[in-house]
Structures are given as structure tokens and as C-alpha cells.
Image: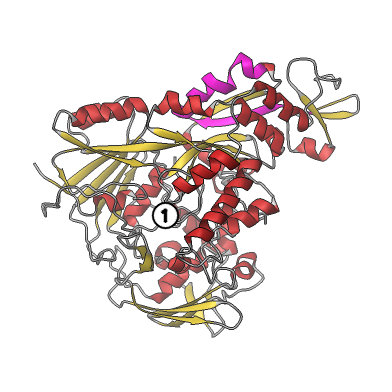
Amino acid sequence: MRKLFAWVLSVSTVCGTLFSLVSCSPDGGVLKIGTTAHLTGDFTPWWTDSMGDREVASLIEGYSTVVADKDGNFVMNPQIVTDLAETANEDGTRTYTLTFADDLRFSDGTPMTAEHFAAWVLLFSAPVILAVGGSGTAGIHFDGWQAYLSGEADTFTGVRLLSENRLSLTVTAEDSVNYYGLYNILLEPLAVHEWLPEGITVADDGTGVYFSGDFTVEACAEMIESARWDTTDRVTAGPFRLAEFDTERREAILERNEYFKGTYDGTKPTLDRIVYREVNTASMFAELQNGDLDVLHGITGVSAINDAFSMENTGDYKTIRYDSDGCDALLFRCDYGPTQYADVRRGIAYLLDREELTESRFNDYAETVDAPYGPVLKIYDFIDDYADVKLDSYEKSAELAVGSFIRAGFVLGEDGQPYVSGIRYKEVTAEEAKSAPRSIYTDGKYLMPLIIDYCTYDGSMLSLFLRAMITDTPETEKTGISFARTELPYEEYLAYVYRDGSQGETYLTPKYCMFDVFYSFGTVYDVRMLYAGYPIAWENLSGIRDSSLEEAAFSLAAGIPSGNDNRYREKFAQFCTVHNQLLPELPLYAAVTVDVFSTKVNGYDAGAMKNIAQSVLKCSVGK
């Protein structure tokens, strides 16, 4: 799955190139892509965020104000913004005034103005979006965001609508200097007529933008929900439009957007249509060979990768090998069950031989990591050397695991007497017992068992390896811990991970304290919201509340001038150190990814840190 984690806005026009293949022919055609990632149809990453859905979003969303150029530097998108003025303010904030091109249109032909970019910030920073289960972090970098999101203010003071084609954005003093430069003023357009009822428009009376009309939960919730799940001629602004999504086949049909004026360098898609489909790993190579697919995207695992290379040896297929944009990890709930105690999380780490796991599943196609990093990051060599010396590798040790469980207080048996055998228990308060439904009450004591409710999803290969190596082994059982494993359909699993109340109140109530996930780094390594301690931190999936981790995550990029690599390394090392100690997630490995495709596909250009839109924009299909 995705970036289940690192919160990244969909930047469909980012264009950093690591691989170049054969030149593009102008033939266009239909490209059929198979992916092993899951497609749920939730193509707006403000609720849940699976990798397959995110790839579809990259194809249909676009016109970001800020993009990465061919060297990976963030620049204004000249197709969208024709002029940019910057002012440093006395209070430390920084104001940017953007002038938008006057020839922008959505996929249905509707003209696009500055109002649509302001609407994107307003909607996805509003209390209304929180009320329907979404994230309100779109305007996190702008002055007045917290007051607007909390409902204290009706206007968003840091965003000003100056005219039909001009908008100003005031970045907070904390974020006015940022390692990623212009990233803070990345906006995307919102098709207001798709998302909000008629009569609601963006207004500005001189103090900031707001939605005029009946912008309330009661008036807007139904239409927002409808727009979220709209899979037929959805109104967007990317190189392709979503014509249809087949929920049975898990297949998205995308057609070229005739109104798309191009990426930052003017590139327009040559393909007429893309069929993007979730495939079964058991049949995916056969589908490629018989022509049902042209491309297999995102292959991992030693067996599958070797099969891809074998196909290349026939001469009818090509492969591209690149580093994955993230690492697999175990997500712990730090506010629920036994994993709310850091020593329990550390004890679980000591029970798993991560080196053996990496070798067994990937051979030479992955690297074990001790914090959320991987070879795809420019900082990898530095942080990997740092990890060898400074970070705990949690080498497998039943003795150290038991010691951790004892330090966490799990020193009793089920009878409340000192532990002898079986499952360990900890005496807890009545309040703590509420956070662990398996707790029992005996002889005047509340006892919490060391039982880890572990949730995975249908088809998770990682969970199969975990069963053999930790969750179902006699060696684990002897330490006094037990894992209760639940396998769910992917959509339900995702709803529990994200505590997605929009799918039902049951998902708001904690039930599981460990998940296997994919931790995506993203184009910008901005993880502040993953560990933010205040209640509106939707992305804080672990539920951890620790000021040292929150500060380390926040200061990772904020306050560091662009280009100051030494300072950034310092901050990254600090973040990894705190993360390694607290383990809100247990990073496992960062894997190699391979794409394999027919030689009749011209211009396919996959690579590390690239989404599928970037891979296919110059594609055509020959005979």
C-alpha cells in the first residue's frame, strides 16, 4: 500500500527524471497497466490513502502551483502561475502574490480562476471537512490556519482573493524559511461545482477568504461524499479524466483530458486512454504475455522480480528497476492496548529478526532500515552510516524482549500473582483498562493482558512472513506475549488504520493495536502531522503524543534554508534517533521495485519518486 503515512499532497505534474527510455512516438493509443497495489475508488487523499488510489489521483489531478523541475528543485509552474511576488513581513511571515493564467479549464471545460485554488485550501482546511471524516491540513503552512480549522474564525486570514486571477498566501513565521523552498505554497484547484452546493462561492471582504452561502455540514456533507466517490466523468484538472471505475474488476478507465494545457514544461499526454487495473500476483505475468496488459507496475519480492527479468531476456519485454518510495513497517497504536507502552513496542522489535525477514522475502532486492528512510532518499548514505553507529538495530533477542515486557510492567499472571508462564499481565488503572477491552478485573485489580490485536488485509505477503517469524511461533509464545491476528478486506482494513468514521462509527473505536503498512516518504519528506499531538492531527495514525518526537518531526524542514544540506542532515538524524527510541512504527525494509512492459510501449519512463502519471505522459503504444 501507499504511503499510508507521510502526508503528501498529490503533485501530478512533478517531473524529476531518473530514467529515460526510447523516444516517444505520436501514435497515442490505449495503454493497459496492471498494478499489485489496491484500488478502492477513494481517489481524494484527504480520507484514506492507498498507493493504487494515489496513482489514479496522479493521472486525474493536476495544475499544482508548485512542481519539481528536472533537477528535483521546487519551482512555480509557469503553465499555471504567470507572475509571483514575494514579500518578507516584519512579524516573520512571508507573503506570496500569485497571478494565474487566464486559459485554465477543468476537464469538463469549466473556466478556472484564482477562486478555485482558494477553494481547495478553504474546503480541505475547514471544520466541515473534519466533520465528514477528512483531513483539514491543506492550509497548514498559512497564517490563520489553526483558527479557521478549529472554527474560531470564519475567514482564513492567510489566504486573500485579490482579483479574478490573483491570490496572496501568507506563510507562517515558523514555515517562512523551509528546506523545500516553494513547497509551502503548493495549491491545487478545486472544482467547486463538483464539491459544494450551488450558491456557495469564495469571498473576501478584505480580511481573508471564506465560503459565502450555506457552508455547513448539514448543507454540504452529502455533496462532499458524492464528490469523494465520483467515478464517472469526475471533474478534475490532470492530464487524464476518470471516465469510469469498475468496482468489481478494480479497474479505472482514464481518457485524455482535452483541456489539459501541459505540465510545467508543456508536455501533454499522447495516449488516448489508460486502463489501470489491480491484478492478481498469481496471474499477472500471464496477462502481460497474452496481451491483456502492456505494463506491470510496482513489482516487489525476489520471485516476482526474477520472473520479470526472465521475461526481459526473451527480447519482447523491457524492465526498469528503481528504489521504492518508502519502507514497509509495523504501525503501533500508541494510545490503545499494550502497544501504548514504548517498552512493549521495543519488545516486539526484539522478537523479529528483520535482517532474516529482508533476506527471505527480497534477497538482494531490499535493505533493512532502522528508521523511516531508504535508498531512494538523497540523504540515505549519510543516515545509513549514522544508523550503524547511533540507532538501535533491535537485533533479535528473546531475552531482551522479555526484559522490555518486564520494564513495561507485564509481570503478573492471569491470577494477579507474579508471572510464571502463559500470557503476561500488567496491573493497570480503571482508565487504562478502558483502552484495552481484553483487560480483566480480579481480586480488586484491573489486569491488562499482553495480547496484541494485529490487523492485516487479504493478500498481504508481509503478514505471511510475520506469521512464520513472530506472530505464530512457539519462541514468541514463551516470552509471554500473544498475537491475535485478524485478516480483513482491504477497504475495511484501511478504514481501521485511518479511523475513518465516514465509513461507519465502528471504525472510530480502536480495535487493533498493530497493522502492517507501507510508510511512504513522498516527494517532500514532511512528516510533522504524523506525530502532531493535538486532536486535529488526522494523519497521526499511531496516536502517539510525545513532545520530543513532535518537535523533531516539525523542525525537520522548517527553519532550514533551502540548500543547507548539513543542517538538514543534523535534523534528520535527530528525528531518526527519537523515532528509533519511541517506535510509533517499526520500520522493516526498503525494497527495490521493478516495472516490466512490452517492447511495443514507447516512452515509458518509470523511476524512483515518480508517480504513474510521470511515467506515462510521453508514452505511446505501437504495434
Residue 233 in which image quadrant: bottom left
Q: In this rendering, is residue 614 above or below 211?
A: above
- Say which element carries label 1: loop
Foreground pick, 122 / 582: 582
> In the image, is residue 463 part of the stretch drawn in magenta?
yes
Query: According to the image, what is the colour scheme of the structure?
Result: secondary structure
Q: Report the quarter where the C terminus lies.
A: top left
* Residue appearing at x 14%, y 33% in the figure: 316
Identify the residue at horizontal 61%, vertical 74% (top origin): 154
Q: Amino acid at mark 1?
A: Thr
Q: Which residue is mark 1?
A: 523
The answer to whether residue 372 shows anywhere in this view is no
User: What is the quadrant of residue 411 in the picture?
Assistant: top right
- 356 relative to 43 in the view: left or right: right
What percent of the width, then of the height, locates residue 160? 50, 79
In the image, 561 versus 169, the foreground residue is 561
Q: Is residue 231 magenta?
A: no
- Asked whether, in this view, residue 20 is left or right of residue 566, the answer is left
Instruction: Specify whether 105 is left or right of 599.
Output: right
Point out the stretch of residues depicted in magenta: 448-477
Q: Nearer the viewer, residue 442 or 533?
A: 533
Residue found farthest to the right = 444
Is residue 103 among the parts visible in the rendering? yes
Q: Position of residue 524 (x, y in %)?
A: 45, 56
